[in-house]
Image (cartoon, grey):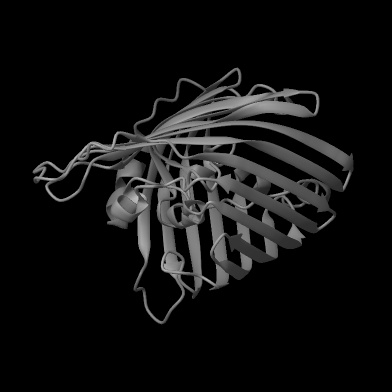
Amino acid sequence: MVKKWLAVVLLLLSGVAVSHSQEVVWSVDFDSEFANREGGDWLRRDQTFLFTRLAPEIGIQLGNQQSGHTLKGGVSWMQPLNDDAEGAKVTPTLYYQYRHKGWKMSAGMIPRTEMLEHAPRYLWSDSLAYRQPNIRGVMVQYQKHPGRGYAQIFVDWRQQQTDTRREAFNALISGKAYMGNVWLGGHLQYNHLAKTKIGPEGEGVNDDVTVNPMVGFDWKIAPKAALKVKAGAIINLERDRTTDDGWHTPCGFIGNLQGRWKWIEAEQNVYAGSNLFPLWDKYGSELNLGDTYYCSKFYSRTDLRAHIVQNRFVDLNASLIFHATDKITGFWQQITCRFYIDQNLWKHRRNKKYLHGGRLLQSNF
């Protein structure tokens, strides 16, 4: 399977026109995570796991990084660490990207690392991010000046309809606009779960709509110290068309406080309101894409993180994560490492000032 995809990529690249200045572009993205999770329930069982992900890509670029065309292909190989290859998953990556005056349009199987900002966990859980590293569809982004905000929309076709598989897709609009240190923004998501081709009796169409306005404040206190605060509302609209219950309308308050000093980082997340996913027991993650902790009326998550090594190409960190809901508590210990290199970093490989002058962020796979 992998050989077939690589052959397709090479064939497409060989047929690209050369009317513009061209450059071979490549990247290698590596992630590894160890996690020990304690204090779960039937939705979040105690478990320990260790896995790696390797995502090489290669392509051709016409123009430059600010304005031009790029066609890239590769694979994302996720491998639990055990004695054999059991549990491995190889996902093909193949996408076209066009950039012009702050606009960026991508189509195909697009790595989620291309997103300007990742969806919060109440919209896209870590578990799904591990197993579904790509957006399968179209993404349009605008960001001319990073300090002024961004706009982003994508459609992710998660499942194609077959005799046994239900059609599923979601569309997410995200944005942020800065006014000094204060910003306004948020997320709007529509998630759709349709029938299988056969559509047996009792199987219906389901809808899930999330409205999430947010306001925040970012403060760079010193060159190596920063504080970020954000708060907002979550309004979820869910409907099961096989019943006469109509729309469920859970809602709540969401808040986040994040601080960093040198290599030490702390983050506090709080949710208070109704069960955001009233149809979870029936449809699970086919319909509801967020973390199951948000099935609770109250949820607190505290992350204490130490960045052991962090520069432009690597981030090795260790975290202690404390969970508390109105029913249970949980304690996770986690070590994660991301290594990333591409043709631009390779060109500056002997420039220590450049390599250590920025921060690589965790990819969230």
- Toward the viewer: 337 or 319? 319
Residue 273 position by quadrant:
top right
Task: Identify the residue at the far front of this view.
Answer: 245
- Toward the viewer: 232 or 63? 232
Question: Residue 352, how many percent across, how many down?
Answer: 81, 52
> Can I make out residue 219 in this image?
yes
Task: Identify the residue at the far right of this view.
Answer: 222
Residue 230 position by quadrant:
top right
Quarter holding the N terminus? bottom left
In the image, residue 193 sits, relative to residue 75, either above or below, namely above
Question: Residue 163, how many percent across, how many down?
Answer: 11, 47
216 vs 293, left or right, is: right
In the image, residue 252 sits, relative to residue 327, either above or below, namely above
> Can I make out residue 107 in this image?
no
- Toward the viewer: 242 or 220? 242
205 vs 198, left or right, is: right
